[in-house]
Structure formats: C-alpha cells, structure tokens
Image (cartoon, rainbow, N blue to C red):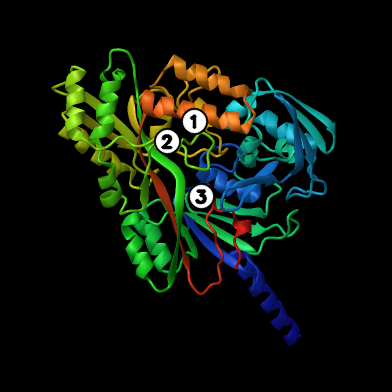
C-alpha cells in the first residue's frame, strides 16, 4: 500500500507539473519573444506580418515560402496549373488532417476562400472580392476563377490560410477567433491576449513533426523590456533587437546576434491634392532633398539600415536598379520652394506611428527638423499604430511615415494598394488616400494581363520610375535591418526569413 501511495503521489506531482508547464518532462522547448503581438487567432483576420507570422505555425496555405530568398513551393497544394488568365487549378495534398482529426479536402479550400470577402473575419477582402467562382472537381481538385487577371495570385497563397469547414461552422466566431484549428506544424494550447501564447508540436504534421515540442511566445513591445527578457535568460530567441542596444547584445558572451537586411522600406507618403503646396512637384522634390537620410541612418538607425531610392527591394519584380536617390541639398530645396511660390514656406502635418517601425517616432522627429531648416513648418502627429493605420485608410493624413515590403514579390499588387487612386468599392488604393495620377492608374491597370515575367518586370520598372522619379509620389528613406538574438549554448539553429516571420518548424534545437 505504501508503494502504491508513493507511486500515486508521484503521478499526481507529474500530472500537476504537466498541467502547469504544458510540456512533457525532457521534451524540447523554446521561449520566443517578438516585438509585435498577434491581434487575433482568425487565420485571415489580419494581414499584418506579425499576425501572419504567428498563424503560419497553426495553419498552412496552398503554397508556402521557404529559404533565404523566400521561394514559393508546394504546401497543401502539391501543384497547380494556370491554363488561362482567369483560371487556377489546384491539386491538393492527400492524407492531411486538421488538428481535430478532420481530413483536409477541397470543401475546406472553397470554404476558406469564400470567407475572405467577409470583413468581420478577414483582411484579405480584396483577394476575396477578386474571385468569380470556386468549383470542386473532386475531393482533391479545386478550380478558382478570378474576375480579372491577377498575375500574382499564386504568389500570395502562402499567406491565405486554409480552415476546417466543419469545426468552423460548428463554433461561433468569437471562439474561432481565440482557438485556432488548422493543419499547421503546431497545435494551439493557450492564448492570454497581451501576455503569452502556448503551442505544442503537431506530431502528425504532413511535412514531418517539428524539432521543438513546446513553444511559449510572448510579445513585448517596449524595447528595453524586450532586451531585459533576453539578457535575463527568460527568452531563448528574441526578434526586434533595438538598434540602440545592439552593441550591448553583441558584447554579451551569452548571446548571439543574427541579422539580415530587411525587405521593408520606410518612406514618406505625399498628397497631391489640387491647391495644396504638395500638388506642385517642385515642392515634393524640395521636401525630398531637404531630408538628410545619411544622417538618419548614422545617428537614429545606428548604422542598421541601408538608404532606399524606391520602395520595392531587389528580389521584388518592379525593383529598378537605375533609380537613384535625390541628393541631400537643402539649398536647392529652398530654391525649388521659391520657384513654386513658397519662399516663406508653408504649414503641414506629418503623421506616423510610434510603435510600428524601428525608431519610427525619432525618424519623424528628424524629418520635421530637416523640413524646418528649409522653411517648411511641419507639425508632428505620431500615435499608436492601432489608431494611425485606420486613419491613413480613411484619408485623414496627407503626409505620413509608412513602411512596406511586398509579400508576393511582385510590386504590381502593392502598387494597387499604395499608389492607385483610392476606390473603396473596387478595393483600390487601400493605403493611398492622398495621391492620385491618371497616368499611373492607367499604366498600373495595364499590368493585370501581363503574365510573361520579362515583360512584367519591364512594365513594373517603368511604373516604379514614374512614381519615384517622374512624379515623386513618395519620399524613400531606407530599408531596415532585421536583428535577432539567441541564447548561446542551447543548440538553437535559426535562420531569419526575408518576410521576418518566425516559422517554428524551421527552427531546431
């Protein structure tokens, strides 16, 4: 009896330990800290890269991106065909199961794509509205037809996640938004919003069980607090290392820094509303030449950025190597303002987020000071991203700091969001409520039917030159650098992705 009692107590102790930690004794575990929290567990409920990153661990798309260059490869679709400009035929992977045991079939694909047009559960509304029909040929073959040609349609499918039709329809949306059920490499355990997210390896994952069994992910937006979690050993892997603390991390013998050039460009969006000062290209050019970007990189970014002359980065179709930055020249800027009739300057408000991009508020403050030196009186209006981005979409700002990288590696998609004249009915100009140019719109719309990659690259490069050089629709600043740190001595193998996602199946320990 005494032996039985001892064994029983040991069993209770181990069970209690398991319930507290959510992980098995001896199982591999990792604590990850990121700089931006997920907003929702709705897989397509946010198109922010921070949310997509987290969802990539619970869900899969028909395709996925892998490798240092982000190559598009099969996922839930083993292959696809594109027989004409409007038709996409997908052959689905057999034997895949959702975390609840339900098989993945074509009905789930149809259901998932149909949900995209519902603004209550999706921020991929443009993708949803672009679809004309979805036909199930059999359980593992589905045909999607778009209303208009979309050359980058397949390139976007790594971030359009597939859901289980049966369990989603059986639950209310509130539960779906907090308890994800996908086909991904990790299963959901617990989410305390604003605190932590726990997940466990999916041992039956179609691509093979991931190396790490248990993961706890925490989001700490405040840089110094995030740094403290790293130094104290509370976190094994941390993203978004603050540039001002970079040297301290490098000098810490317990830590290893991993960095790579970021795809995200930081730039200033400008309006050209008739009658406003910035309607005159000479004014826009003057503002561009008034900003000392080299100094921003040196003093504010601490050298952890590269000057940008355009928004797309080199891997993106549309990047134009012939575009160069305008030189910093405040005297020429003053001359241009005089020529445009603004010798005494003018008043303008510069808006921006203070918690989204690296040093975003300090960059905005610097821009205000540079503009003041040429006579432009800019009032600073920075605020949390949760307030700022809806205001941009609503057209409340005419001059603002923004950041962007194209997830499809095809700038055509981004141009429709960033530079096309805003048309909410058609889902155009989502992040452009300030600039409008018919010639840009016309050239952009002509790219929809260009599927030949060589021709497409040339037209998008021409469009890029028109926007960046001929029209000066934006003032480019720099490309960020992605900086991570990991604890030494724990055997963590981590390679940063170009999209900055933390895809846990790609990490080993």
Residue that mark 3 sits on: 500
Q: Quadrant of the N terminus?
A: bottom right
Q: What's the mark number on residue 153? A: none
Residue 243 is at least partly visible in this image? yes
Tell me if label 2 and label 1 are in contact, CB under 8 Å: yes
Q: Residue at x 42, y 33 (%)?
A: 389
Q: CA distance from mark 1 to mark 3?
A: 25 Å
Callout 3 crowding tier (Cα within 10 Å): few <14, some 14–19, many ≥20: some
Q: Secondary structure at mark 3?
A: loop
Give the camera-side residue of 380 and 77.
77
Give the camera-side residue of 130 and 470.
470
- Mark 1 or mark 3: which comes first in sequence? 1
Q: CA distance from mark 2 to mark 3?
A: 27 Å
Q: What's the mark number on residue 322? A: 2
- Mark 2 or mark 3: which comes first in sequence? 2
Give the camera-side residue of 393 and 150.
150
Q: Nearer the viewer, mark 2 or mark 1?
A: 2
Callout 2 crowding tier (Cα within 10 Å): few <14, some 14–19, many ≥20: few
Q: Quadrant of the C terminus?
A: bottom right
In the displayed orientation, state which residue is furthest to the left.
344
- Mark 2 or mark 1: which comes first in sequence? 2
Q: CA distance from mark 2 to mark 1?
A: 9 Å
Residue that mark 1 sits on: 461
Give x and y (percent) for residue 463: 47, 26
Query: Quick check: 11 above or below 31?
Result: below
Callout 1 crowding tier (Cα within 10 Å): few <14, some 14–19, many ≥20: many
Give x and y (percent) for residue 100: 75, 49
Q: Secondary structure at mark 1?
A: helix
């Amino acid at each position: 009896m005494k032996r039985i009692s001892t064994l029983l107590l040991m069993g209770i102790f181990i069970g209690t330990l398991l319930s507290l930690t959510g992980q098995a004794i001896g199982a591999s575990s990792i604590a990850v800290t990121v700089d931006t929290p997920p907003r929702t567990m709705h897989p397509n409920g946010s198109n922010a890269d921070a949310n997509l990153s987290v969802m990539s661990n619970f869900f899969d798309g028909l395709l996925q991106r892998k490798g240092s260059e982000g190559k598009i490869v099969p996922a839930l679709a083993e292959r696809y065909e594109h027989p004409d400009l409007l038709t996409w035929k997908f052959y689905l992977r057999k034997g895949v199961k959702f975390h609840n045991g339900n098989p993945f079939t074509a009905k789930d694909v149809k259901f998932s794509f149909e949900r995209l047009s519902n603004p209550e559960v999706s921020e991929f509304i443009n993708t949803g509205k672009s679809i004309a029909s979805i036909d199930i040929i059999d359980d593992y073959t589905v045909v999607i037809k778009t209303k208009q040609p979309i050359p980058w349609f397949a390139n976007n499918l790594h971030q359009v996640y597939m859901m289980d039709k049966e369990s989603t329809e059986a639950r209310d949306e509130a539960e779906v938004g907090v308890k994800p059920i996908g086909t991904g490499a990790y299963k959901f355990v617990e989410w305390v919003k604003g605190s932590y997210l726990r997940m466990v390896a999916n041992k039956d994952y179609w691509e093979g069980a991931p190396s790490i069994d248990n993961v706890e992910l925490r989001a700490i937006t405040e840089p110094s607090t995030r740094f403290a979690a790293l130094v104290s050993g509370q976190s094994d892997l941390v993203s978004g290392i603050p540039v001002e603390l970079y040297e301290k991390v490098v000098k810490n013998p317990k830590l290893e820094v991993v960095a790579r050039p970021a795809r995200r460009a930081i730039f200033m969006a400008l309006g050209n509303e008739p009658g406003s000062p910035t309607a005159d290209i000479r004014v826009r050019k003057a503002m561009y030449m008034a900003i000392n970007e080299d100094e921003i990189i040196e003093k504010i970014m601490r050298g952890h950025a590269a000057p940008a002359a355009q928004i797309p980065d080199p891997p993106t179709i549309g990047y134009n190597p012939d575009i160069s930055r305008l030189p910093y020249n405040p005297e020429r800027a003053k001359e241009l303002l005089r020529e445009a009739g603004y010798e005494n300057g003018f008043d303008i408000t510069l808006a921006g987020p203070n918690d989204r991009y690296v040093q975003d508020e300090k960059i905005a403050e610097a821009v205000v000071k540079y503009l003041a030196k040429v006579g432009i009186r800019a009032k600073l209006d920075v605020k949390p991203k949760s307030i700022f981005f809806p205001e941009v979409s609503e057209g409340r700002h005419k001059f603002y700091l923004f950041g962007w990288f194209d997830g499809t590696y095809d700038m055509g998609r981004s141009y429709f969001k960033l530079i096309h004249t805003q048309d909410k009915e058609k889902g155009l100009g989502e992040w452009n409520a300030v600039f409008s140019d018919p010639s840009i719109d016309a050239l952009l719309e002509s790219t929809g039917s260009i599927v030949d990659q060589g021709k497409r690259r040339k037209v998008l490069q021409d469009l890029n030159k028109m926007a960046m050089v001929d029209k000066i629709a934006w003032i480019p600043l720099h490309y960020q650098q992605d900086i991570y740190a990991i604890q030494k001595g724990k055997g963590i193998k981590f390679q940063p992705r170009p999209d900055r996602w933390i895809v846990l199946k790609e990490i080993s320990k």
